[in-house]
Amino acid sequence: ALIHGLNRHYYSNAINYRKNELEQKMLLNLHKKIWTHGLTLPNFTEHTEINGKSVNIMKKFQTMLTLAETYNKSVQEESTMTHEQLKARHVGKQDPKRHLEESGR
């Protein structure tokens, strides 16, 4: 009602439509699967491919999580360091923020 600019001058009336028994049965069975659907086995090669892809995705998320944790730890350590220590902090090491950005792409 607000979309049409009617504000408070609009009262929604409930429309009651009674369905007969046949229509109710048809609507209840609309999204049902057949009874033999639970007995069929999925294709094994497709299932293993899907599992392999999901495992690879989980490994990538795990590495992203560890990189994010190391970045958080390095940010917390930077807050307690002096200016001279910050200059020599990442010498000979990989910058965790840059590594996290590169692996996220």
Image (cartoon, rainbow, N blue to C red):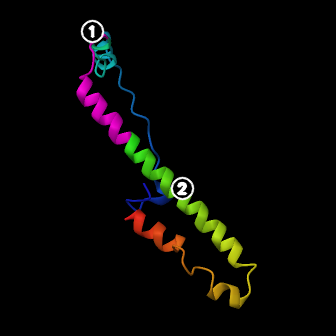
The residue beneath circle 2 is 65
Residue 76 painted magenta = no
* Disc 2 from disc 1: Cα separation: 42 Å
Q: x%, y% of residue 21?
A: 32, 10
> Which amino acid type is shown beneath numbered disc 1?
Thr
> Which residue range is magenta in the image?
39-54
Q: Which mark is residue 36?
A: 1
User: Could you say whether the residue bearing mark 2 is in a helix, strand or loop?
Assistant: helix
Q: Amino acid at mark 2?
A: Leu
Left/right placement of residue 9 relative to residue 4 reads right
Q: Position of residue 71 (x, y in %)?
A: 59, 68
- Please determine whether, in this image, residue 91 is positioned above or below residue 22: below
Main SS class of the magenta portion in the image: helix
Q: Residue furthest front?
A: 92
* Neighbour tally class for label 2: few under 14, some 14-19, many 20 plus, Cα within 10 Å: few
Q: How many marks?
A: 2
2 vs 42: above or below:
below
Q: Find residue 3 and name its label.
A: none
Query: 18 or 81, which lies in front?
Result: 81
Which quadrant holds the C terminus? bottom left
Q: Quadrant of the N terminus?
A: bottom left
Comparing 16 with 83, the one in front is 83
Q: Is residue 1 above or below residue 105?
A: above
Left or right of residue 49: residue 14? right
